[in-house]
Image (spheres, rainbow, N blue to C red):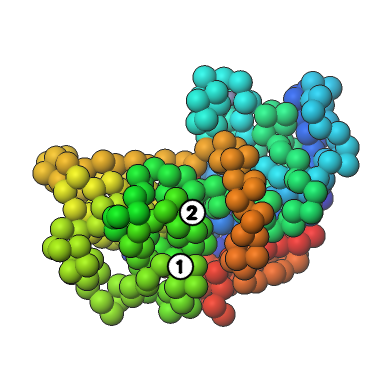
Amino acid sequence: MQALTFHNKHELHYESIPDPAILKPDDAIVKVSHCAICGSDLHVYHAHEQGLDSGTAMGHEFCGEVVEVGRAVKNLKKGDRVMSPFTSSCGQCFYCRKGLTCRCEQGQLFGWVEKGEGLHGGQAEYVRVPLAAGTLVKIPEGMPDELALLLGDILSTGYFCADQAGIRPDETQVVLGCGPVGLMTIWAARKLGAGHLYAIDQVPERLAEAERWGAKSINFAQTDAIQFIREMTEGRGADAVLEAVGQEKSNRLAFDLLRPGGIFSAVGVCTHEHTVFTPVEAYNKNLTYKIGRCPARFYLEKLLQAAQDDAALLCSVFTHRYALRDGVKAYDIFANKLDGCVKVILEM
Ligand code: NAD
Ligand code: ZN
Ligand code: ZN
């Protein structure tokens, strides 16, 4: 099959790799109809995260049609249209039962093969999905692939970020980053009744999007965001900051924006070695710090209806569409924020 594969920093190939096969009775094979590029793929692309084997199929946002199931998979059959969270999960272990499906005892991240172990990704014609009965969800009749892709990762992630932030209508919330995850976070914060919602970035098109999605935008390259938010909060700072960037600087900004007793909710993946605030700084702020991978399998089901209600807005996050064979170019455009690109969808 054809796939977009990792080789080195900024070096992806569109090439032929072996077709996936059923390896265990609880596997399924999905023929991908659409896939998308995530900000998390950029950590791999820029080689911030080490270890991925050369030749690994990239990506973890995909949907498509079941073409084969192992003998233990009873709830799915050939021909079912399915979506997938970005990690596999069994649905039965301690963590899955708690709704922390991202920490499933047997869970794996799609698009991560290291020393021959792990899962190939969804930026390919076919994907092997382990624990298929617990991982895959049938796409409801009439739901477009675009929405199914969003539910499998960034829509769920944005909601998770807002859910952790203890949103209250009488308080001030700040979303850091107006990339795809930041926009989903704005949507979710509004759903959860955000009071005074601000969003920070420096890319003009993305700030304009943040306004369209319902936040007041702040360009941190032009405005002193900390001073601005203090002025809006009688000198205190934000009640909650929702971090959707994952850089050292954005993390420090998030910390500095918060009032004492505030909540720092982070979904941005920061690969820096240390936290940007010290234990005593956190102590002196009575900080609540919530961070982690989104349990997308848990949120995906919870959000099915709300997502369909706002499908037009949510799907408008996809600004660019390419064929999988043009995926190398698509990565360049997304990674470098060229041509007003916010999010890319790839079709077969
Ligand atoms: P993206 O790179 O497209 O967007 C990040 C945005 O942050 C950009 O618009 C950039 O201009 C802006 N930015 C950079 N520095 C900033 C700063 N100091 N202050 C404010 N904004 C700043 O990425 P994305 O697809 O939106 O993903 C965002 C993050 O979310 C990534 O780190 C990704 O790995 C992570 N992520 C986490 C999960 C999870 O489960 N926790 C899931 C999906 C994505
Ligand atoms: Zn992702
Ligand atoms: Zn599990």
Residue at (65% x, 60% y) in the render:
311
- Badge 2 element: helix
Q: CA distance from mark 2 to mark 1?
A: 11 Å
The dot on residue 214 is: 1
Residue at (65% x, 65% y) in the render:
312
Name the residue type under label 2. Answer: Lys
Vertical order, 199 against 283 (above or below): below
Name the residue type under label 1. Answer: Gly
Residue 120 in view: no
Quadrant location of the C terminus?
bottom right
- Residue lying farthest to the front in this orientation: 170
Residue 254, how many percent across, how many down? 28, 56
- Badge 1 element: loop
Q: Nearer the viewer, residue 214 or 99?
A: 214
Q: Residues within 10 Å of mark 2 (few under 14, many from 20)?
A: some
The dot on residue 191 is: 2
Residue 134, how many percent across, how many down? 67, 29
The dot on residue 13 is: none
Residue 275, how many percent across, how many down? 26, 46
Of mark 2 and mark 1, the one earlier in the sequence is 2
* Image quadrant, ligand 1: bottom left
Q: Residues within 10 Å of mark 1 (few under 14, many from 20)?
A: some
Residue 309 in view: yes
